[in-house]
Image (cartoon, grey):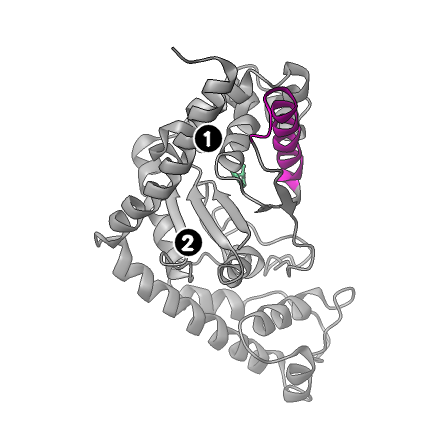
Amino acid sequence: MKRLLTGIKPSGELTLGNYIGAIKQMVAEQDNYETFMFIADMHAITVRQDPKELKERIRKLLALYIACGMDPNKNKIYLQSENEYIASLSWILECHTYYGEASRMIQFKEKSKNNENFSVGLLTYPILMAADILYCDADYVPVGIDQVQHVELARDIATRINNVYGNIFKMPEAMVKESAIKIKDLKDPLKKMSKSEDNPQGSIALLDDINVIRKKIMGATTDSEMRIVYDMDNKPGISNLINIATSLSDYSKEDIEKMFEGKNYGEFKRFVADIVCDEISKIQEKYNELINSDILDKILDEGIKESRKLAKEKYDLLREKVGLIR
Ligand code: TRP
């Protein structure tokens, strides 16, 4: 079975948009690939973090992913920082990466612009990411479009090292899901749904109170017509709600259009709210079971074993090839 690897940075809270646009796909993939899923906590500290908050966010994120259906029996789930070989491997990769290459990364350029005090970690961030990917010979790396350049850098580094020292790394491929549905902001349906702290009324966090979620959907921006039809250009609000409903149920767009012919927007919103609240309640129930239990620790303890074993093998091999050996 081909190997698929995903890293998730513990930043911000997860929204309904993340759930529909990315997490559900990941959950579906776990049957098709041997999957590695880790929390990229080391990537979070390229900018200063509050330690207590970071610790909490890591745990919450992990509990939420599992509550959303990531199955610890099908995935290796681990914490990046608990695998010390990744950072060690990253150092050797850094020494095979040109400063010019690293400083050309778009994300680095954007984040270092207008900021005099950025850390060197911001520059080496994609090289640590290369170590994440290359140590376990990942075949596929599902990423957002903004991370494709980083996967390409990982390929360049791998090619260079393979050319010099023989066949060490497998060539990973970025997997960009263009077809994933992009859920829009409920108040401004032309914008992507993003973290709810930035826009509390337009965004649904997976850990929002269920009554709050219902209110947000009932208050979603629509239009002045009274037709429930899918038309992204002319009816972005209604179309967004239809996308939400079809993503979380077996109804098709056509089913919904038929069901709500001649009905009003209030009825339609109540229908969408029921679907969303039902799905999120189930997630929250599982989340609440997990968050204060020791199951999470057991999952991480188990997941890290295979990860460390593979990373040590790769690190020892490369160390030897490079001449870091007695
Ligand atoms: N940089 C990725 C992001 O911001 C997170 C990440 C870290 C990652 N290491 C990775 C993703 C390895 C895929 C593979 O989303």
Q: Is residue 150 magenta?
A: yes
Instruction: Please state which amino acid type lies under the numbered disc 2.
Output: Asn
Q: Is residue 106 magenta?
A: no
Write down the region rendered in magenta: 146-168
Instruction: Please state which amino acid type lies under the numbered disc 1.
Output: Lys
Is residue 281 visible in the rendered structure shown here? yes
| Residue 31 percent across, percent down from the top left | 49, 63
Give residue 314's mark.
1
The foreground one among 241 and 35 is 35
Neighbor class of circle 2 (other Cα within 10 Å; few <14, some 14-19, many 20+) is: many
Is residue 45 visible in the rendered structure shown here? no
The foreground one among 86 and 170 is 170
| Residue 182 percent across, percent down from the top left | 64, 58
Helix, strand or loop at mark 1: helix
Residue highlighted by disc 2? 75
Helix, strand or loop at mark 2: strand
Kindly check if marks 2 and 1 are in contact, taking CB atoms under 8 A apart as contact. Answer: no
Q: Residue furthest right?
A: 233
Is 67 placed above or below 167 here? Answer: below
Residue drawn at point x = 36 percent, y = 36 percent: 308
Is the stretch drawn in magenta largely helix, strand or loop? Answer: helix
User: For the C terminus, which image quadrant?
Assistant: top left
Residue drawn at point x = 41 percent, y = 13 percent: 325
Number of marks present in the image shown: 2
